[in-house]
Image (cartoon, rainbow, N blue to C red):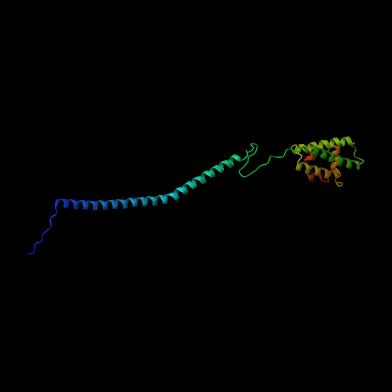
Amino acid sequence: MIQTHHKQLSPSQKSSLVDKKLAEYKSMALSSLSAAKQNLIDSGETLTRKAEPRREQDASRSLEKRRSMEEASGSRSRDPPLRKSHTVHRGETIAAPPPPTDPKPVRQNAAKGIEEALKARVKGAPDVEADDEKIRELAKVIESQLFRLYNRDAGPKYKNKYRSIVFNIKDEKNEGLYRKVVGGKISPRSLVAMSAGEMANKEL
């Protein structure tokens, strides 16, 4: 039978061996901690790099939104004030109405035209007695009634009616109209109220 003799360690040797083992464990622990720390640092940098583009995008959007609001506000402040006398819709521009024209020249020409038409017919009819003054006053009354008929407006309707009256007075085939107007059988008020067909009636 073989006997194995184990070398006995002295107390100092045992203490040295324990210290050596502790140093190895401590070195291994420090290496592990250092590696873990580096991993945490690397992870933080990765997260930071991923978050930076998002923050830049958010900041850019916020700046664009602020600029748009400032431009809209500036545009409204530069718009001219709307005139209170007109109703203006968005995108529309309404011009002020033109000043009313003076109807006096139109009325004077109408009275003159009626007077000349009556004088021309009376001059060719020896049996009709009427001096120039009577015809002038009659023409003024006819024009006055015509102006009143169209609510004191010497516009297109007034002018068309005037032309119709003068045309029928001058019509050589119409012998009854001017005679009854000058003789008083058709009053100025009735004359201006007559239609073109009534004035042209051969039975007048």
Question: Is residue 19 among what the camera can see?
Answer: yes
Q: Is residue 164 above or below residue 39?
A: above
Q: Is residue 151 left or right of residue 59?
A: right
The residue at the point 58 percent across, 41 percent down is 76
Position of the N terminus, as image quadrant, is: bottom left
In front of the other: 156 or 192: 156
Quadrant, the C terminus: top right
Q: Quadrant of residue 101?
A: top right
**Residue 123: x, y in percent?**
91, 41
Of 160 and 100, the residue lying toward us: 100
In the rendering, at what x and y percent does residue 164 appear?
80, 44
Would you place residue 125 above or below residue 5 in this image?
Answer: above
Q: Nearer the viewer, residue 155 or 183?
A: 155
Measured from the top left, where is residue 161 in percent x and y? 78, 43
Give coordinates of residue 97: x percent, y percent: 70, 40
Return the residue found at the far left. Answer: 1
Task: Give left or right: position of 120 versus 161.
Answer: right
Q: Residue at x 80, y 38 (%)?
A: 105
Q: Does residue 187 appear anywhere in the picture?
A: no
Q: How many marks?
A: 0
